Structure formats: structure tokens, C-alpha cells
Image: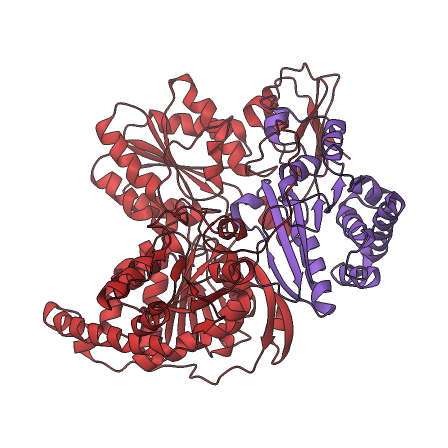
Amino acid sequence: MERLLDDSGKLLVLGNEAIVRGCIEAGVAFASTYPGTPSSEIGNTLQKIGQKAGVYFEFSTNEKVALEAAAAAAISGVRSFAFMKHVGVNVAADPLMTLAYSGVDGGMVILTADDPSCHSSQNEQDNRYYSMLSLLPMFEPATPAEAKEMIKEAFKVSEELKSPVLFRTTTRVNHARGVIELSKPEQEPAKGKFVKDACRFVNIPAFARMNRLKLLERSEAARRVSESSPYNTIEGEGQVGIITSGVSYTYAKEWMEDVSILKLGMSSPLPEDLVARFIRDKDMVIIVEELEPYLEDQVLRVARQNGISTPIFGKRTGHLPRAFEYNPDVISNIGIVPVREGREPLSPPPMTLPTRPPMLCAGCPHRATFYALKKAVGKEGAIYSSDIGCYTLGIQPPFETADLVMCMGGSVGAAGGFSAVTDQRVVAIIGDSTFFHTGVPPLMNATFNGHKFVLVIVDNRATAMTGHQPHPGTGRSHGGRDTPALAIEPLVKACGVEHVVTVDPLDVKSTQKAIKGALEHDGISVVVSQSPCPLELKKRRVLQVSTYAVDQDKCVKCYHCVEALACTAFYRDGEDVMIDPDLCIGCGVCAKICPRGAMGVVE
Amino acid sequence: MRYCVQIAGVGGQGVLLASSVLGHAAMAAGHKLAMSEVHGMAQRGGSVLSTLRFGDEALSPLEATGQADLLLGFEPVETYRMLNLANKDTYIVMNLQPTVPVKVSMGAESYPAIDDIVANIRSVTDRLITLNATELATQAGKAVAANAALIGATAGVKDFPLERSLLEETLLETVPERFKEINAKAFQLGYETVRSAV
């Protein structure tokens, strides 16, 4: 990773690392994010090397804060970079829409990492529409190497137009790996100075109306930039035209034969004149883009307005799918254009294979919390209003502690609604990082409006799912700044919650008792279930590993452990329950719940 | 020339490390390359797939179904799940050591017999090579070097375009000094197993 700081050379890197290098070469002074897959490794890399590269970097409490902070940096004249996953832009959309009115002075690039096929997300929304909604220009790289170069162009365009620029990647760019060539970083100011200009920066209605007109002018200027952008190019000869953007380009380029490709790297605003010229004399045009018919609908409009009758194929004509990410097979199956021939895939005899969904890791404290929670709730049951994080995996049997998952912080807000309209017991579950992200306002809402539910804060001392990034509850210790950890319990109390208990979930009995007490409380009660993520401890090399084994003489084969705890380290050898010594980290929870005390530490 | 390796396994098995070693070796050999890998939620013990494509024109990070030149299976069920990435000419190197999913331990699902998996694959291709990477690694000194055995196995595959020495050097660069010997040994055992099978 340190080699990303070199001035020259070739490196094989992850798309997200290429993006960091692009920012370094662009002379970015400020960067901020809230971690989210597929953008997470950008932050992890900046956390490690940002300071050495002269980049101030922070994990903000949420995407809205990240964008606001980056906006202020850019308004003060330095190059700033805010990045987040696609749904993070929803959180940041409020400042985004009005920042577009104000514009910026230093270059500002806002990266949205979309996740077609929902590899690690709750939806696959197409954030190119944010470009249309905010009237901000947008770039879409196809490969890691292109992403690195394109970031620099995006900053250049941003400063030229005095406008923030959106940069849209997808999982297959962020998590692709490719070779980049390092070039010398540009010299850009590291410190800014804010110059007051109320007409621009204070969008009271009178000023907002003026800025709205300026935004429309900037959008038209951006279209002119797009018409001649070095990233909007035509390659190949042929009477079949392909219009494409992002990673879809690589599939079209490698699998379609005898076509001319208009590759839109700067996809918004659409270079309408270029598109009209490209499609005018073609026999047919195919729009190859993932998710929504974003380009297709605009190309159809351009054709209509220019009196062009070339047939245009894509999603609207049913030739290409609208759901999920594209791949070479999608291109091969298009049917209306010659494609590279492939060999016949093997079709082995059908076999019933076990499923392998992602699971809570062996020794995960969430598993212990869920075990205690299910015991405490008992047969009467409850609505489990869950949230975004590792603990969403509680959806799996035997726990099934996720009945609703919408968005970050949504568990607590929804719990209030459930409690208002049902007579069912309600348990909300939220992680520590998610609680700081957007869990605090709904908790205040709950005490304010007199709701009744139990909130379990599963505090594993990290933003674990995305790679153990720090958050206010852990304090920061990177980039030359050390800040203290913010305690959750006083914060919960300050929200008006009277019944708060902090427990260690590995102490199963006490946790069960605490949750039972919380369920009996009339009003809002909070249980902070606190135990660090063992993977994070392992990373820091402070995990004390011991290994448990089952004493088969004591075991009565009741299978309570595998059925009710279901640790990933368990496996069956005939009738016997075994513990995989390579997976067991020695949390000891199985030994505590075994009715016969059959598990014990081995050497 | 285009060459594609698909690596199938379980999150946490070291699929990412193996694809990184193969990728760096391909770069060192002067190839253009494109790779894709799985990060995030699926890494928590779910099925994972890494794709490595190298050669003159490799641009796309994904490969079409059936077009792999080599399918490297870190786990039997995961290899079977991904068999449609291979064709009759594809070499399939499969680790026989199963990683049992929790639902199987819980008794809710069952894991097929390894012999059945092998027989079913052999019924559609004669290019399956099996090895027990965990056993080879244990023989070399440490079970976690299973990765090294599988990378060694790759080096032994007929017509694999990257040199054995290059792969071994690239692998050992990623390994801490004190584990180099064990990894080199596991690499060699993997290599020899495949060689003797061909």
C-alpha cells in the first residue's frame, strides 16, 4: 500500500486503491466518507497513507456530514473529495442539492459507489439520476486504470465550471484489480481561505432563485465540456453503433464484433450533438448500460429532437435486462449483433448442494447477544426491527432476529411506528457505528413521543462489516489526530432514556437477565451489549486465542449448541458435535450454554 | 492470447490472496490483466469467486460462462457450484478438503459425499485434478499453507502460461520470513501432485 506513494512505476491495484492514487495525483487536500461497500477500501487506504500524501482524511459520522465538510473545504478553495456507497448519497442528498446551487471554488469530486446486483447492499439504485436531479456533471470510469486518470480530469472540470462533479463507480470497478502507472502528483493548495459571499453561499429564497438560474447556465456549460471531453470517444468502425458507459464498455468492447462504440466517460450532461452525429447514419444503435435506461431515454429524446429515425435498441425494446449487473453473457445473449463465439459450458448432473450464505463469524459476540435475546424474549416473540451491519446476519436461523431492514438508523425509527400501532413487543437492534450514524435522532424521537420498545445496541467497537473503521464510539487515532472515545450510555441517557444497562454478551446469563429486565420496563429501554469484534482484535494482534473442544463422554447429543447457537466452528462427525480448532477463537459461549458442561478449553 | 482463471471458494479461505499472487505474476510476465474479486458481506463465510484474465486484450473484469481455461476450486461444493464456468477443455484443480456450512452442522441441509462430487465431475470432463491441499500443507508444516499448495498446483497445470519459478517467487514475497520454508514446501507438494496426475 505504501507503494501508492511512489512517484513512478507500475502497480497492480484494486480499483479503490487506483482511485486513492488518482486523488493523490490530483493534489486533493481534504477527503471524507462514511464507510460503505463497495467504496470502503478507499477510506481504509486513505486512513493509512493519507497523511503522508498530504491529504487530510476523516471518517465522518455519516455521509451527510462527510459531504458538508468536504463542501466547506472546496468552498474554501482546496480540492476536496467526498465518497460513499450509493445509498449513502441518499443520506447526503440534502446538502448535495443546494451545494449544486452554490457551486465551489476548489475542485470537488463526490464519488458514488453503486452496487448493481446488490452484492453488499439493500438495493441497486442507479445514482446516475442524482446527476439529472442535481444538474451536476458526472463521470463514469470503466476500469481501475481509467478511474485513476479520470479523477484528475473530474477535478479539472470541477474547477473550470466551479461546480461539484459526481463520479460514479460500480462494484466491478471498485473491486476490480488492474495495473496503473504512477505519475507525479499535481501541486495544489493544501490550505484554503473562505471568502464570504452571501449571495452564493446563503441560499435564502431570494438568493436561491438567482443561483438556480446560474446552475442552469453551469449545466449548459458542462454540456459543452462534455461534447469535447477526451473521455467521450468513438472507437471502431461499423454500421452498428453502441453507446455505453462504465464497466459495460469492457463487455461490449471485448465481446461485440464489427461495431462502432461511443464510450461516454463523461456521461452527464449527455453530449447531445456528439450523440446525434454518432447515431444519424447508423443502421442501428444499441445502448449498453447497467440498471435503468438512463442513457437510452436521453438518446431516444435526442433522436426525436433531431429527426433521426435510426432504430435504437436496449431495455425499452426488451433486448437488454434492467435488473442486476451486466457480464459478458448478457452481451453474448443480445441476439441482434455478432458476438465472440464461446465454448460450450459444462453441464454436470444436478446435485443438491448446501447453501452458503454469509454467516456471523466463529466467536462473534453478536451470536451471543442473539442467543441471550431469543432466550429472554421466549415463546411470546417480538418484532425485530434491525439495521445495517454484521448483525443483519441475525436474519439466518436459528436466530431470525431481522424482521425489517430498511436503511441506516431505520431500526429505531421503525420501532417507534411498530410500538404506536401494534400490541406486539418490539425489539430494535442497531450497531454502534450505525447508532452514531443515524440512530440518535430516532431515539430522541422515541422518548419525545412516548414509544415503548427495547433497543439493543450491539456495540462491537468498530464499523465491522466494512473493515473495522473507527467511529465516534472508538475515537480516532490516525492522521496525527487522537480523540477520545464517546461513551454510548451517557448519550442514550441524554436522549431521555431512563432504563439503560451495559452488558458483556459473552456473559450469557447476565445479558439474558438484562434484556428480560428491559422487556419488562414500561417505556424505552436500552441494552448496550458491548464486546469487541474478534476479527478487529486479530488484525491488531491482540486477540487471545484459546480453543475449545467437546468432551464426547459428557456430551449427551442433545444438539442444543448446534441448534440454538450455531457457531460456524461446529461441525458434525456422525453423532458427535466437533469444534474446528482452526475456526474456534475461544469465546467460550458454547461452554456456558451446554446443559452438560461438555465443552472445555484444550491446550 | 487470452487466459482466464476462475477461483472458487469460501470467504476466509484465502481466495483473494491466491488471485493476488497469480495477478502479480501475470503482471511481472508482462501481460495485460483484469481481475475481479468479492469483498464485503460475502466474505463472512459465504461463497466467493475471483476472476483473473490476462493476455493481450484483457479488459473486462468478468469472464463469460464456460470460458475459463483453469477453474481452481478451493472447496468441493464451491467447485461444483461453479462448474458451468468451465468447458471440456478447462483444467479443473479441486481441493478435496470440505468446509462444512453451518446449516449442514445444524442438520438442516446435507453435504454430498466427496466421491459423488468427484464422480459427477468426471462424468462430464476428463480434466479434473484433485488434491487435498490441507493435508499437503500439514505435511509441509502448517495447515494454513493450503493456499500455497493450490498455487503450486496451478503452476503444474498443463499449458499454464506463467512459469513455475515466477509463481513461487511471487508467492514467497507475500509470506513472512519465518513461514517461507513451509510455503515453499507446500507449493512444491501441490506442484508435484498435479504433475504426477497429468
Using the image, determine if residue A581 lies above or below residue B36.
Answer: above
Q: Position of residue A19 (x, y in %)?
A: 50, 68
Q: Position of residue A6 (x, y in %)?
A: 62, 77
Q: Position of residue A35 (x, y in %)?
A: 45, 56
Chain A painted colour = red
Residue at the spot 87% in from the left edge and 52% down from the top edge: B188
Letter of the purple chain: B
Q: Position of residue A493 (x, y in %)?
A: 32, 43
Q: Nearer the viewer, residue A284 or B156?
A: A284
Using the image, determine if residue A411 lies above or below residue A557.
Answer: below
Q: Is residue A522 left or right of residue B181?
A: left
Q: Is residue A93 left or right of residue A349?
A: left
Q: Nearer the viewer, residue B175 or A602?
A: B175
Q: Is residue A94 left or right of residue B126?
A: left
Quadrant assignment, res A48: bottom right
Q: Is residue A5 visible?
A: yes
Residue at the spot 49% in from the left edge and 53% down from the top edge: A331
Q: How many numbered marks appear?
A: 0
Image quadrant in which the C terminus of chain B is located: top right
Using the image, determine if residue A243 lies above or below residue B6.
Answer: below
Q: Is residue A95 visible?
A: no
Image quadrant in which the N terminus of chain B is located: bottom right
Image coloring type: by chain
Query: Residue placed farthest to the left in the image?
Result: A206
Quadrant assignment, res A560: top right
